[in-house]
Image (cartoon, helix red, strand yellow):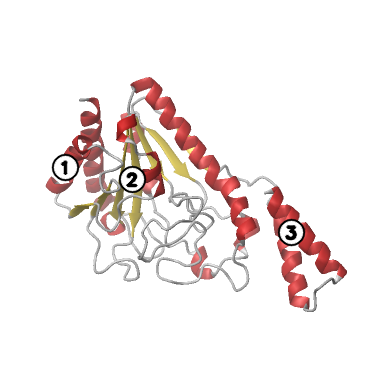
Amino acid sequence: MPGFFGEAVADAYTAARGVAVVDARAIRRRLTRFFKALRMTIPDALPPYRLVRGTRPLLVSIPHVGTHIPEVLRGDYTDAALELADTDWHLDRLYAFAHEMGASVLSAVHSRCVIDLNRPPDNQSLYPGQVTTGLCPGETFRGEPLYRPGREPDAAEVECRLGLYWQPYHDALAEEIERLKVLHGRVLLWEAHSIASRLPRLFDGKLPDLNLGTADGASCAPEVLAPVVAVAQASGYTSVVNGRFKGGYITRHHGHPTERVHAIQLELCQCLYMNEQAPFDYQPAHADRLQLVLKAMTVAALGALSA
């Protein structure tokens, strides 16, 4: 953050003196950047995450459920961005049973439009050669611009967002994994995600209902995954393992079976439990059935973890 603020101050000072500035619009842009940098030094009204600690060796991470955009940033976004269509809607409600199971639950507060907690900090592509979104995405899943012209974050602002929103979530994640590992000797990290079932820009046709990812087997031992797959296959929903979604940064970075930390990502089709169109309302009649399957999957994985 100091780097971002310092650069903005220097820009504003240069603009105010008229040094190397010949365009009034350039002056406005630099002054806007200065005042945004100044406001970003003020703590946000909301914390960067919510963590409820449990007692069992299960941590449910929900990095894309957040919907908050700090007021200082809202003016940068398009109307399409502010609709928040790419949110993993209602997953905190869908996974409410995890609290009853004694699991720890870590949930994002800020929207993935601000920063994507499931991307590497250097913004390397997780799916080379395929369309995907980045650390501070510039487009929606449907290809609509997220930012108004000239309002995209530069490298310094991205670094600021990493420190304010991304790093605290990942610190909390790592600390909770370690705490559970000390208590139990092993941990299951369950990465909870959901997405619209049809997104032609990202995949062909309709996505399978249940998309399990273990980074092609690198993040979870086969004996832990196997009972989860068995539940999925008997559920009546369509399912796939390591298909279009193999696991994002969190699954790949934290899943280390040889260190007794197993990570499984589950990407759900949103049509299974909610309306995929605005206002993205929750549909309890469908969600109740899906919850039973999700609980059975996590129970099966915990059983294998303890075997």
- Left or right? Give the position of 172 relative to 98: right
Lower position in the chain sequence, tag 3 or tag 1: 3
Residue 201 location, quadrant: bottom left
Q: Which mark is residue 231?
A: 1
Mark 3 surroundings: few (<14), some (14-19) or many (≥20) residues within 10 A: many
Q: At which x and y percent is residue 111?
A: 50, 54
Q: Which residue is under mark 3?
A: 8
Residue contact between numbered discs 1 and 2, judged by CB atoms under 8 Å = no
Q: At which x and y percent is residue 60?
A: 37, 38
Count of numbered circles on the image: 3
Lower position in the chain sequence, tag 2 or tag 3: 3
- Left or right? Give the position of 264 relative to 165: left
Numbered disc in front, either 3 or 1: 3
SS of the residue under disc 2: helix
Between residue 157 and residue 211, name the one nearer to us. 157
Q: Which residue is under mark 2?
A: 94
Residue 129 visible to the viewer: yes
Between residue 244 and residue 195, name the one nearer to us. 244
